[in-house]
Image (cartoon, helix red, strand yellow):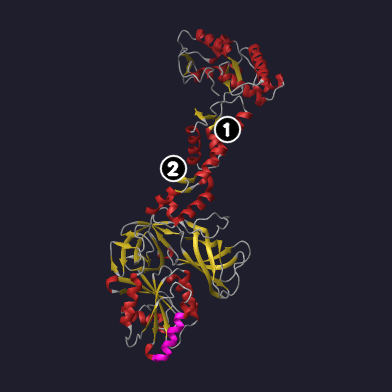
Amino acid sequence: MILGTAGHIDHGKTRLVHALTGVDTDRLPEEKRRGITIDLGFAPLALGEVGTVGVIDVPGHEAFVRTMVAGATGVDVALLVIAADEGVMPQTREHIAVLHLLGVRHAVVALTKWDLVDAEWMALAHEDAREALRGTPMHGAEIVPVSAVSGAGLEMLRLALTAAARRVTARASADLFRLPVDRAFTVKGTGTVVSGTVWSGTIARDAIIRLMPADVPVRVRGLHAFGRPVDRAHAGERAALALAGVELHDVQRGTVLVHGDAWRATRVLRADVVLLPDAPRALAHRTRVRLHLGTSDVAARIVVADGPLQPGTARPARIVVDAPLVARAGDRFVLRAESPVATIGGGIVTDPIAHPRARPWPPGTHAADRLLELVLSDAAASGIELGTLPIRLGLPPVGIPAIVERIQCRAVGSRLVGEAALARLRAHASTLVDAHHARHPLDEGVPTSWLRGQLRAPVEVATATLDDLVRRGALVVANGIARRPAFMPHLDAADELVSERLLATLAAAGREPPSVGELAIALGVDADRLRSVAHFLVRRGLLVAVEPERFYPRAVIDQVLASLATAMSNGETHAAGALRDALGVSRKYLIPLLEYCDQAGFSARDESGGRRWRGARGGPRDGPGHEIS
């Protein structure tokens, strides 16, 4: 569990943490010299039966609010520090707004410097604090007067913090590991060390994790939690990880450590964005802001539709960031204006891996079922990777199957596809096959490889679509060709006439037939149409394709085979030239005929180029017409 301080500069946050924990969280020389907190400080705090919690002490100066946001992200309980002699100040209000935007629900207010004010002034400070929290989930926070100098009220503060901590829902350890890095440094003899709050999951020593968004694998060579070595760190703990395989300059605040391959770096988020009521101006379309998510701080543009987002209102939007970051559905973020610098709003991530041109979703999309429906609808035929569902839905892996079962979708290989998208694919595939049958009635069907490509879906999804159609009896697939069950290749009246003329012409040509191009000119028929008719006749056993563009009548090929069988009946090897007289053809026709015989298995060619007859059953034959094209 993580306890984070908040409050105006010089209201005594660091001194109060020291009084509670005995640890001075101001570690930098500049902090010692100036007497203010500049960077995040950390300390362990024992809270009786709750155990040890991690304390994050944040700076209160307005110049370091970006650092405060990094520290406040992931806080379970806020310790709001307000000096009784000054009351609520500008940074107090901004810190309260940040905590509210980050979804912090549990808080305790410490009215410090109790020893400097009288009872009447303390009562006013108490009312001032209560009013500042009005309208936030922290409005019922216990308010405790304390003095870090005298120690008065410290025990009551511990009890209040313990009570608040008991109300916090434990983070999910049975989840994907994620730790946003808030510090990185080098330890002599150890190497690169990073620290942060474990947001979810657990991590063990010697585990291989990923450094995001660079997506670099590193090994956890050592682990510390709350300042002591451990074998495993759990969700809600402050942890320091010694990393092997990475240099210090490769790690900085904003880097995220994750485990598993489900995480993705992104430049586009969908989110529900809210603008604070006291924001100085409306948020216009594509306004530049600073986005704070986890410990990341990046420039971004907010893309909203239907006019500017007005102060005090919320609306779905697309967020385009200048640098890649790692997010998960349900993550909360803070938005700050670049000029003048101020916290202006925040929101909740609804789609952490949005399409670059994704339209904002309608409001009220936080329910996991609805999120999955929207994600699948956007993905259409592509579907989404099953492994990324915990990221897209913001749920531990154990909760995913129940969601999937309630949605009209199906796992296809490694992807999840909506049933509506699969139905559209089936309809599209059927239309393509019908159109092909209509345009090419002589073809046996559509090559499945071409059909899968036309579906414009991942191979596994396209293949599953064709399998569905076969299983439903809507398609027949054989030898890589798909067709409708009732379809049979056929010649229409015009093609019947072309077929008759083609067969007659080839029969008259004998062993030296013209090519398809020559036939097209002689017969006055389109070459593609003529070619389709010829292949139809090949499949019917009436023609043989000796070359891709030259066809022989089946009877002529039988004569050629008989002549070659006689010429090579002695079992010896014969040169091509010696067979020319046996066939009575020129070399232009001789070589293709001999190569056809080789490929069909009737003859065998040796290294010298000579051939030996293998017989009528010498080898494989491609169908009744021996088509080899």
Taking 625 as reference, is 74 above or below it? below
According to the image, label 1 marks what residue? Answer: 433
Q: Residue 241 versus residue 358: which sits nearer the camera?
A: 358
Taking 55 as reference, is 375 above or below it? above
The answer to whether the residue labelled 2 contacts the one labelled 1, judged by CB atoms less than 8 Å apart, is no
Residue 330: image x %, image y %? 46, 61
- The answer to whether residue 306 is left or right of residue 178 is right
Looking at the rendering, in which quadrant would you find the C terminus? top right
Q: Is residue 599 magenta?
A: no
**Three-letter amino acid code at disc 2?**
Gly
Identified at 57% across, 55% down, the residue is: 358
Q: Main secondary structure of the magenta part?
A: helix
- The answer to whether residue 597 is left or right of residue 167 is right
Q: Is residue 125 magenta?
A: yes
Q: CA distance from mark 2 to mark 1?
A: 24 Å
Q: Residue 296 versus residue 435: which sits nearer the camera?
A: 435
Quadrant in the rendering for residue 259: bottom left
**Three-letter amino acid code at disc 1?**
Val
Q: Is residue 61 visible?
A: no
Taking 381 as reference, is 130 above or below it? below
Quadrant in the rendering for residue 241: bottom left
Q: How many marks?
A: 2
Which structural element holds mark 2?
Answer: loop
According to the image, label 2 marks what residue? Answer: 413
- The answer to whether residue 549 is left or right of residue 184 is right
Range covered by the magenta-colored residues: 116-130
Q: Any mark on residue 222, and which?
A: none
Q: Earlier in the sequence, mark 2 or mark 1?
A: 2
Mark 1 is surrounded, within 10 Å at the Cα level, by few (under 14), some (14 to 19) or many (20 or more) other residues, namely many
Looking at the rendering, in which quadrant would you find the N terminus? bottom left
Q: Residue 231 versus residue 378: which sits nearer the camera?
A: 378
